Image (cartoon, rainbow, N blue to C red):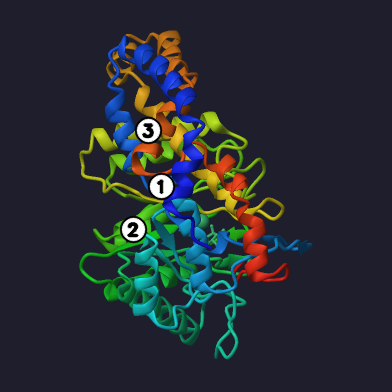
Amino acid sequence: MKIQKKQLIQANKGKLAQHNKELKNLVSKLSSKGINTNAIIKTIQNYEVAIPSWALGAGGTRFGRFGFGGEPSSLHEKLEDIGVIHALTKSAGAVSLHIPWDIPKDPKATKKFAKNLGIKFDAMNSNTFQDQPGQKYTYKYGSLCDTDPKVRNQAVRHNKKVIDYGVALGSKSLTVWLADGANFPGQNNFRTALNNTLDSLKKIYKHLPKDWKLFIEYKPYEPNFYSMVIQDWGTSFLLANALGPKAYTLVDLGHHLPNTNIEQIVATLMSQGKLGGFHFNDSKYGDDDLTVGAIKPYQLFLIFNELVFGMKNNKPKNPIPAWMIDASHNIKDPLEDLLQSILAIEMAYAKALLVDQKALALAQKNNDITLAQEILAEAYQTDVRPLLAEARRKAGGVLNPIETYRALDVRSKLIAERGTDSKATGL
Ligand code: PSV
Ligand code: MN
């Protein structure tokens, strides 16, 4: 299904007068404080977040899965769904592909198909956490860390192949997330597992084209419950440093133990020029894969506050992080979930852009704790939705994406096209 331009214009028509009124009020309020609202609108207008190819169908849990009618059952259908999100928001012009869940049979044709929808290829994701049909060696006990060099080499070869697919599609980065670890004390030798992983990563790194980046994701537990080889940002950072300048740490919000200060991790990594990318989601207990901003919107704002500061004070140079959503929930319409995610991310970003950095630095210098808190609260409590709507409108999207998605009855149309039993590949 493809949304037509005139449908978007039509959707905005009845809402424009009210929007203009709300925008005018907000702009005048913020301008009186010396805030350049045009600059914020422009930043949001140019902001894009990649949609993971595994989030377009309903996810499952180990207890089962409840399908969602009209799920995309091919890579091109997944791209079409991202095209819908992008048409509404103008902020989803990229996809993050998972191999082998979404192998492009004809990369050239897929690249062209995506281009027609305004979609680029962001980071490629390898998968050595599942065995695939016909695979020679099992990953049951590990992949890049395994004690058997044959297993490690197979996993390295897979990652190289993923890079090759990415090159054909125009991607510029590879994300490696490993399930490697141990379920019981004594199962692994920690040092051997880490050294094997580094050694394997070095071989993958060597295969990276000049202008590529390698993102190393970490996770404290699951699927292994005693230890994960790359358990935290420190381990990822250590590996990235050992590999070289093209290797970076990737922060997935759900990959932290409860109450971890993620904003501090972001600040630390950026101060070392090693924050490569982001996986957005939210959680209450662990890697819950809930919609970003659904549980801890203030934390998301504080994270963006560090990102904004880090991007402004970019010494040593940290590249602009690769922004990616990584959530796949099981009972919501996946497209609505992704629309909500984009809105929550942009909301946190815009609020962070409101923070009076100069005043905050002065309050910090003076140890004026109350004032420092108030400065953050002032930004966080501002309703920035008119600015976001204006950024979308200017970019050619709609003022209210979720309302329009429902008004256009997208899900029913997808069900009519694809049936009620179609199932997305992946999670
Ligand atoms: C693992 O939990 C993860 O966050 C990694 O990014 C994977 O690539 C993705 O989820 C899908 O399994
Ligand atoms: Mn992730």
Q: At numbered mark 1, what does the secondary structure look like: helix, strand or loop?
A: loop
User: Of the residues under marks 1 and 2, which one precedes in the sequence?
Assistant: 1
Which residue is painted at 44% across and 83% down in the image? 105
Which residue is painted at 55% across and 74% down in the image? 74
Alpha-carbon distance for marks 3 and 2?
21 Å
Residue identified by numbered label 1: 91
Residue identified by numbered label 3: 306
> Residue 418 location, x and y as percent?
64, 70
The disc labelled 3 sits on which kind of residue? Glu
Q: Which mark is residue 240?
A: 2
User: Of the residues under marks 3 and 2, which one precedes in the sequence?
Assistant: 2
The disc labelled 2 sits on which kind of residue? Ala
Q: Nearer the viewer, mark 3 or mark 2?
A: 3
In the rendered image, the vertical position of residue 135 relative to residue 90, given as above or below? below
Q: Is mark 2 within 8 Å of ligand 1?
A: no
Q: At numbered mark 2, what does the secondary structure look like: helix, strand or loop?
A: helix
